[in-house]
Image: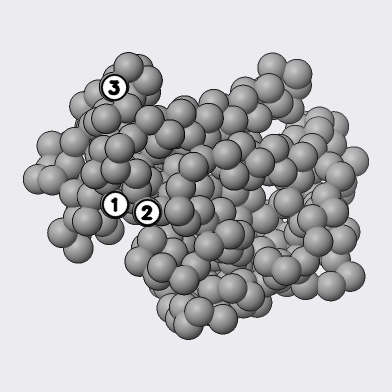
Amino acid sequence: MKVAVTGGTGYIGSLLVDALLKRGDEVAILSRSERPKEKKPKLSGITWKQLAVTPALLDGYDAIVNLAGATINQRWNAAGKQAILQSRLDAADAIATAVAALANKPPIVVNASGISIYGTDAAVAHDERSLVRGTDYLASVVEQWEAAADRIPVQRLVKVRIGLVLGRKGGAFPAMLMPYRLFAGGRIGSGKQWIPWIHEDDMVRLLLFCIDNPQIAGPVNACAPEPATNDAFGRAVGKAAGRPHWLPLPAFLLKAALGELSFLLLEGSRAVPGKALEYGFQFRYATLRDALRQLLG
């Protein structure tokens, strides 16, 4: 199989590229730089500029996985918000333009999305059939992102709505673990906000599952079957790390320090992986205890 991956040098993208290469696929990383950082058999690079000039570089590819987008872990001022949104729209639009020009279009595009599209209503657990009712900034970004992805003229489009990815070497989890390492861990704000999480191994396996399963299309929640509240999540981290969960971080202090960015820690979406389970995906780390035990040993 020939797979093109945007965001292939990022945290999740690099894990996906390694998994694709390990199973024998040919991979092209779409990025601003033509050459991948590491030289590996069956690994190549295409720049966005090259793709704009010569869309046929993707002719005959079996799949495109679009994980490109500026990090949301930055100041949410006007410039930061624009970068977060525009980077996602630009990547989806570039892929749509390229695919439209291809004689042999890929059968599938897997486009990253966000679990925050469901908003912060915690009354019920949201699966892919739930109405999209989020009114906050992140929900708005994800709605526009998915709308841009919907314009990609491809036979099968999968929109993977990603929750908090747990891994030791990337993403937000190392920063979340640090207070516990310093014996200063505790709930954040009310502690009642939900955290839809997924272990990095399951994240990559779910992306591969979506590529390989021709029946899957539309939104797919990338989160474990058991979301946890912030307080329960912190208690589980403390137990796995052998550290106390005792020092609460008041919401007003977090807002004073981070401004609007504090929303990431003070609010959350309660989501479950309805479609993944329906199609037979088996989580290796279905419980938070198992995931943290693997990560923290």
In what quadrant of the picture does the C terminus appear? bottom left
**Which residue in the rendered view is the most extreme toward the left?**
41
Graded by Cα atoms within 10 Å as few (under 14), some (14 to 19) or many (20 or more), the crowding at tag 1 reads some
Q: Residue furthest front?
A: 103
Q: CA distance from mark 3 to mark 2?
A: 20 Å
Residue 236: x and y, percent?
63, 72
Task: Find residue 75 and report its horizontal and vertical position in percent.
Answer: 69, 26
Spatial separation of the CA atoms under disc 3 and disc 1: 18 Å
First-in-chain label (2 vs 1): 1
Residue 54 is labelled as 3
Residue to which mark 2 is pinned: 107
Residue that mark 1 sits on = 62
| Tag 2: amino acid | Pro
Q: How far apart, in angstroms, are the residues tagged by discs 2 and 1?
A: 6 Å
- Residue 213 locus on image (x, y percent): 40, 70
Give the residue type at disc 3: Thr
Q: Is residue 60 visible?
A: yes
- Identify which residue, 130 or 170, lies in the foreground: 130
Q: Which residue corresponds to the image point at 67% horizontal and 55% vertical from the top-left?
A: 115
Q: Does residue 235 appear in the picture of this structure?
A: no
